Image (cartoon, grey):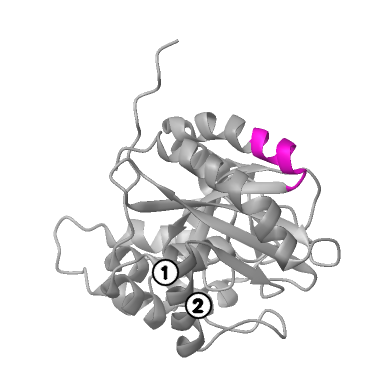
């Protein structure tokens, strides 16, 4: 069997961070651009308003989250409902399964997902822990592949799931290797709030953590995302040497100490990350 052609992953840019959660003033800033479809941008912004909420939303809640007018939100939701992307009951809107087609198109178009899955499966079998591969997407991380041995988070994560970058091992590691412009945009737009008593949220703390990550070439998060959860991440470097993704392993803090994570997990994780890196050309 021929070796798969290396795929390309685009590095993060400051403009992608700014566009992660576009407020209304950013959208209207494109109003004079004849090639920019403002109505499409508003519709996508409305769709993204549902990404972090499981319960149905009202028009007022969507308007508050997107900073769009109620009239614009109403028209967007009506259009999305007619196209089958949202449903509505008693004034409350919820996503429908059709939205999965949008994400599936991305994941099915890249060979990295199918090529990396057996590598992560082998890693998880070897260490008997849950592993994952993710990239930086705006102020969040986006999971591309996950091999779950046992559930360690209170909620299940799968392909396409997102978590805040600042309090996850993968996110903090990837941020550590970003250029200054990307970090400035990140701190300007990220919603830094404590998830647990341990969460680092100040810029000073996070920048110190970034420096430490570059020094040791890994990140270990201790109960910053969720109580009782520890996670460790190592970088995935493309053939060019650029850090474009990361592999993480999550464990229950009561069962695995930080010292054991470093001693037992770091080497096999780095081997898996190197194998995945050989698949990436950028």
Spot the residue most to the top: 1
Q: Is residue 124 magenta?
A: yes
Q: Is residue 157 magenta?
A: no
Q: Which residue is mark 2?
A: 209
- C-alpha gap between disc 1 and disc 2: 8 Å
Relative to 273, is 231 on the left or the right? right
Image x and y of residue 121, in percent: 66, 34
| Residue named by callout 1 | 176
As helix, strand or loop, the secondary structure at mark 2 comes to: helix
User: Residue 10: image x %, image y %?
Assistant: 31, 49
Q: Which residues are magenta?
A: 121-129
Q: Position of residue 5 (x, y in %)?
A: 34, 25
Q: Residue 261 lies in what quarter of the image?
A: bottom right
For label 1, count other residues whose C-alpha is less than 10 Å away and answer few (under 14), some (14-19) or many (20+): many
Report whether 135 appears left or right of 26.
right
Residue nearer the viewer, 21 or 28? 21
Residue at 42 percent across and 58 percent down: it is: 44
- Contact, mark 1 vs mark 2 (Cβ under 8 Å): yes
Q: Residue visible at 51% across and 89% down?
A: 202
What is the chief secondary structure element of the magenta stretch?
A: helix
The residue lying toward the viewer, choosing from 154 and 172, is 172
Task: Give the residue displayed 74% in from the left and 60% down from the top.
Answer: 260
Q: Pick the quarter of the image with the C terminus.
A: top left
């Amino acid at each position: 069997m021929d070796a798969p052609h290396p795929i390309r992953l685009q590095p993060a840019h400051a403009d992608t961070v700014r566009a992660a959660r576009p407020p209304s003033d950013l959208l209207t800033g494109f109003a004079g651009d004849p090639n920019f479809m403002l109505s499409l941008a508003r519709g996508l912004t409305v769709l993204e308003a549902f990404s972090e909420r499981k319960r149905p939303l009202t028009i007022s809640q969507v308007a508050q989250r997107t900073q769009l007018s109620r009239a614009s939100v109403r028209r967007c939701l009506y259009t999305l409902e007619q196209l089958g992307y949202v449903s509505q009951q008693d004034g409350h809107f919820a996503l429908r399964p059709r939205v999965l087609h949008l994400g599936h198109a991305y994941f099915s178009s890249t060979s990295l997902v199918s090529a990396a899955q057996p590598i992560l499966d082998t890693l998880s079998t070897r260490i008997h822990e849950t592993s994952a591969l993710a990239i930086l997407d705006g102020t969040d991380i986006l999971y591309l592949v996950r091999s779950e041995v046992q559930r360690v988070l209170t909620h299940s994560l799968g392909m396409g799931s997102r978590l805040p970058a600042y309090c996850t091992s993968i996110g903090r590691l990837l941020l550590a290797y970003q250029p200054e412009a990307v970090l400035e945009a990140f701190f300007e737009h990220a919603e830094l709030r404590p998830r647990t008593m341990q969460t680092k949220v100040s810029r000073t703390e996070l920048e110190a953590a970034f420096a430490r990550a570059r020094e040791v070439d890994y990140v270990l998060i201790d109960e910053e995302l969720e109580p009782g959860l520890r996670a460790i991440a190592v970088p995935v470097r493309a053939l060019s040497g650029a850090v474009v993704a990361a592999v993480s392993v999550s464990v229950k803090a009561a069962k695995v100490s930080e010292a054991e994570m470093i001693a037992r997990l770091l080497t096999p994780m780095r081997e898996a990350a190197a194998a995945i890196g050989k698949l990436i050309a950028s």
